Amino acid sequence: MKKIIFSALLLFAVIVFSHAQQSDKWVFGATIFNTGSLLPGKIISMPIHPGFTLGAEYRYNDNDRHEIFQTAQLGYFFHRHAQHGIQLYSEFGYRFWWQNGIHLHTKIGPGYLHSIPAVQTFVLGTDGYESKRVSRGQFMPTIAIGGGYGIGGRKDLRVFLDYRLFMQMPFVREYVTILPNTALHLGVVFDF
């Protein structure tokens, strides 16, 4: 488990700092989101399970219409009666811009999810069952589609909406090995 955590943190650091000297290609952002344990298709899950992300985006090219980019994200969500989740992930993406500042994008990438139970759990000990909070690391692949608007036509100041599917693997080895989650993100991107 420590190797997985170390590898995920190393991947995050390499992505963020590999091109740090080219600061004109970096933008930063934040989102708030609602997540639910759902298959793709349902947009909003009820009740609300809130979360947020902070991250950076590196643009590989400087084309007016077609943009290739990479993200590095750190997030947190709370799923009531289930878990707290700490996310660390990176996505590779493509964005198409219209001249009026509207854009559509798609992203895909690997990630790490650290799951902490939000309910009391018990483990069989020497004197019977004992209450214990057991956290665990999981693989978290993601895929997202979305769109947004560049304020004043700018690429470095924009608002966007993402619909994201992410998987938790393995969730419960005995009967639910893959848990699909969907999340609707409302975000802002800006340049310092």
Image (tube, grey):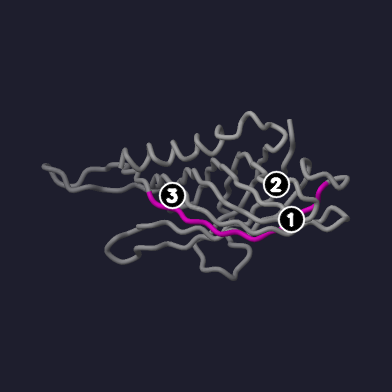
The residue positioned farthest toward the bottom in the image shown: 41
Position of 90 compared to 102: left or right?
left
Choose between 9 and 159: the one closer to the eye: 9
Q: Nearer the viewer, mark 1 or mark 3?
A: 1
Residue shown at 55% from the left, 68% from the top:
40
**Residue 183, image x and y in percent?**
58, 57
* Circle 2 residue: 61
Name the N-terminal-most of marks 1 and 3: 1
| Viewport quadrant of the C terminus | top right
Position of 36 compared to 123: left or right?
right
| Viewport quadrant of the N terminus | top left
Residue 22 numbered mark, or none:
none
* Circle 3 residue: 83
Q: Main secondary structure of the magenta part?
A: strand
Residue 148 is one of the magenta-drawn residues: yes
- Residue 167 vs 159, above or below: the answer is below
Q: CA distance from mark 2 to mark 3?
A: 39 Å
Q: CA distance from mark 1 to mark 2?
A: 8 Å
Can I make out residue 47 in this image? no
Position of 83 compared to 122: left or right?
right
Local packing at callout 2 (Cα closer than 10 Å; few below 14, some 14-19, many 20+) is: few
* Circle 1 residue: 66
Choose between 17 and 83: the one closer to the eye: 17
Residue extent of the magenta highlight: 138-150
Q: Secondary structure at mark 1?
A: strand
**Residue 112, image x and y in percent?**
44, 47
Q: Nearer the viewer, mark 2 or mark 3?
A: 2
